Amino acid sequence: MASVERDVEGDIESVELTGQEHWREGPPLELFKEMRERCPIHRTERFEEFPEEDGFWSVTTAEDVHTVSRDWETYSSERGGVLAAAGGFPLELAQAMFIGMDPPKHDRLKALFQRGFTPKRIADHEEAIRAITVRVLGRLEGRETADLVSDVAQPVVARVIGSFMGIDEQDDAIWARLMNSTLGAADPDLNPYGFEGAVERDLPEIFERCRKLIDARRENPTDDLTSVLVHAELDGEQLEEHEIVMGFFLLMAAGNDSTKATYCSAMRALMESPEQKQLLLEDPGLVGDAVEEALRMFPAFAHFRRTATRDTELHGQKIKEGEKVVMWYVSSNRDESRFEDPDRFDVNRKAEHQAFGAGGRHFCLGTALARLELRILIEETLKRYPDITIDGPPAHVESLFLNQLKSLPVRLAP
Ligand code: HEM
């Protein structure tokens, strides 16, 4: 963190936010704080790792993130992709997922899925999700220590999204590895082959496996989401093969990384603030509020990006057509003008956050599923291990995008 503080003392405008040194221990929160105060729309000129990529504008306050999020006509998801840097991921693939489309196509495609993700439909899965969680936690029986990332979070979220998508349980670990390496491509532990390796090795494997599943569902439809994609019709026409594959990829990616990240961050915060954990032990009804507070403080995705479709102005800053605009949820969720003492984890805060986006067309489809999974995971973990403590330094994924722990060693009982 020393280098961050040194930078901040200097000229905040000239700080290169993408410098890897800022991200080794998670998002550079001090740096974002300074930006909100002194330079809320901040310019980063270049990427250390991708010199060929354009720089971007950073949007750091809750109000400005809200403005960008809601104005899809000025800030497009389709024109240039939804991440600050594509990292070699082809634009046409990003545009084949509805997260990378603008209305009207976005709205029509999203509507196909919305029916499967209503709070009521998701609540129907509570028993199944609890059974998965209990089964995974049951494997820890007799052990004194564990890693909450690999022993609990990963297998639970992989099976939950795997069962929604119709994946065989024996393939969960393979899918988890593939999604981790493509989304966490910057992290040498998640992806030892570098960005090119992720694009050239892992993406083709994902597509190949996905195509096999699609073929199977074409012949024998089931009630899983892959069948929905395969048999969906828009304006009387079926989706093209690459749209089905990328629809599958989007749900797998969103389902795998997000809840895993938030569960682990929440557990870490609870272990680091035992008095907050105690509140939940005394009143398990507060777990839902703890989930919201964890979403606020540790949004699973650090940012999403838009591209300006015309010359415009935001918070007094001129933005030109074609420029990248990055919404930093890791910053807006700690905006002191919205949240008192924003760095304090407070399960009684009950504050509205932007972890799922700030409204608008691209608001997260999976909120009900994520909230349910997170509540069950925390409830069941604390029920079994009320005295759980941290047992070594947690490790953070190195990424401008994934705000996620890759290791969280714990002692299950004292
Ligand atoms: C802790 C959990 C989660 C967080 C923090 C999260 C966060 C987000 C955010 C910030 C967006 C907005 C993207 C943008 O503005 O461009 C988004 C979109 C989306 N999320 Fe989630 N998500 C979570 C869980 C899930 C789950 C479990 C699923 C489904 C399996 C899911 C599916 C999606 C989809 C399909 C979109 C695209 C929506 C659209 O473009 O209209 N998410 N999510």
Image: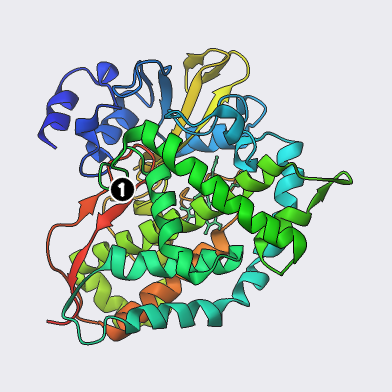
Q: Secondary structure at mark 1?
A: loop
Q: Nearer the viewer, residue 370 or 94?
A: 94
Query: Quarter holding the N terminus?
Result: top left
**In percent of the image, x 39 and y 60: which residue is there?**
260
Location of residue 313 with respect to 31 vertically, above or below: above
The outermost residue toward the right is 236
Residue at (30% x, 70% y) in the render: 151
Circle 1 crowding by C-alpha within 10 Å: few under 14, some 14–19, many from 20 = many
Q: Position of residue 63 (x, y in %)?
A: 48, 36
Q: Is residue 52 visible?
A: yes
- In this rendered view, identify the residue nearer to me: 202 or 24: 202
The spot of residue 126 in percent (x, y) is 55, 78
Left or right of 179? Residue 31 is: left
Look at the numbered disc 1 and say if its residue's Cβ is closer than 8 Å to ligand 1.
Answer: no
13 horizontally vs 214: left or right: left
Tell me the residue that label 1 is attached to.
190
> Where 350 sits versus 205, above or below?
below
Give residue 163's position: percent from left, percent from top. 56, 69
Q: Observer-nearest residue: 255 or 76?
A: 255
Q: Is residue 349 visible?
A: no
Q: Hey, what amino acid is under mark 1?
A: Leu
**Which image quarter is the C terminus in?**
bottom left
Task: Report the residue at 22% width, 62% height from top.
Answer: 408
Query: Which colour scheme appears in the figure?
Result: rainbow
Q: Is residue 262 above or below residue 317?
A: below
Say whether residue 156 is left or right of residue 120.
Answer: left
